Amino acid sequence: MNKIIGLFAICLSLTAFAGNNDLYITQTGTGLTLTIDQIGATNTVGKSDSRATLSGTSMTVDIDQIGDTNTFLASLLQGNSSSWTYKVTGDSNTATLAGGATGDIASSDFDYITVGDSNSLTWTQGAAATATGANTDFTITGTSNAIVGTCEVVGCINAWTISGNSNNITTTQTGSADHQITATLTGSSNTVTIDQTDTASTNVANIISTTSNGTINVDQCASGC
């Protein structure tokens, strides 16, 4: 596996500024360290019908895309006690990620950092009964960025720091255990929608907002949110 990752690094370094670089990964194993840097436009990690798939324990994954209209499509199938960082710098970049799609991601940390405009992230945590909650942090700087987040599992913990104008954040958290969202907003006309459904435990939404004409909607209920 180390040799394969080394080849990936060599290929990326040779073509980093050309754009249109496509990278597809299928990985299984423990203790993986993976670093990917893509610089340029219209680069791709994974594709809609063949996403990058990563599965294992104690992994460290760092994806960095610099440029415009880049795409990251990945399934983090099982990755407990792992660290994931996805950083995008530029405009009109798109990411669709599924964490814990087939297994446990307990004690893992996912960080999404974006600097630019009109970037979007669709993040799903769960879809497997064993996918106990990990910690997710979103740091967003720019205008008209969008996040759609869904947590289908136990004990989701999310922290957002959002600076800019007209950003749209939508999240839904379900499952019979404690969920927590901490959101810090700075800017104008930010739109935040939070739905937390829980029949037995405690949901926490802590929102610190410095905005003008911002819209924040929070629904916490046993069912029907």
Image: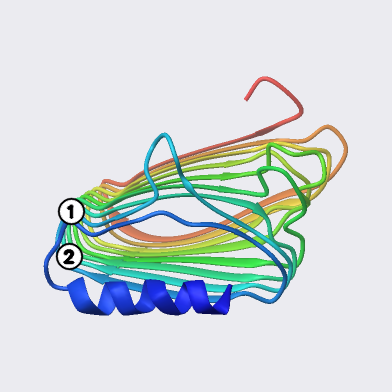
**Marks 2 and 1, the one that precedes in the sequence:** 1
Q: Pointers 2 and 1 in contact (CB under 8 A)?
A: yes
User: Is residue 194 positioned above or below 5 on the image?
Assistant: above
Q: Which residue lies furthest to the left in this view?
A: 18
Give the spatial CA distance, label 2 vs label 1. 8 Å
Q: Position of residue 113 (x, y in %)?
A: 38, 68
Determine whether, in the image, residue 64 is placed left or right of residue 79: left
Q: Which residue is drawn at 17% across and 65% down?
A: 67
Determine whether, in the image, residue 8 is placed left or right of residue 223: left
Of residues 47 and 2, the one nearer the viewer is 2
Q: Position of residue 101 (x, y in %)?
A: 66, 43
- Amino acid beneath label 2: Gly
Q: Residue at x 72, y 71 (%)?
A: 30
Q: Which residue is drawn at 77% across and 38% down?
A: 175
**Marks 2 and 1: which is nearer the front?**
1
Determine whether, in the image, residue 154 is placed left or right of residue 41: right
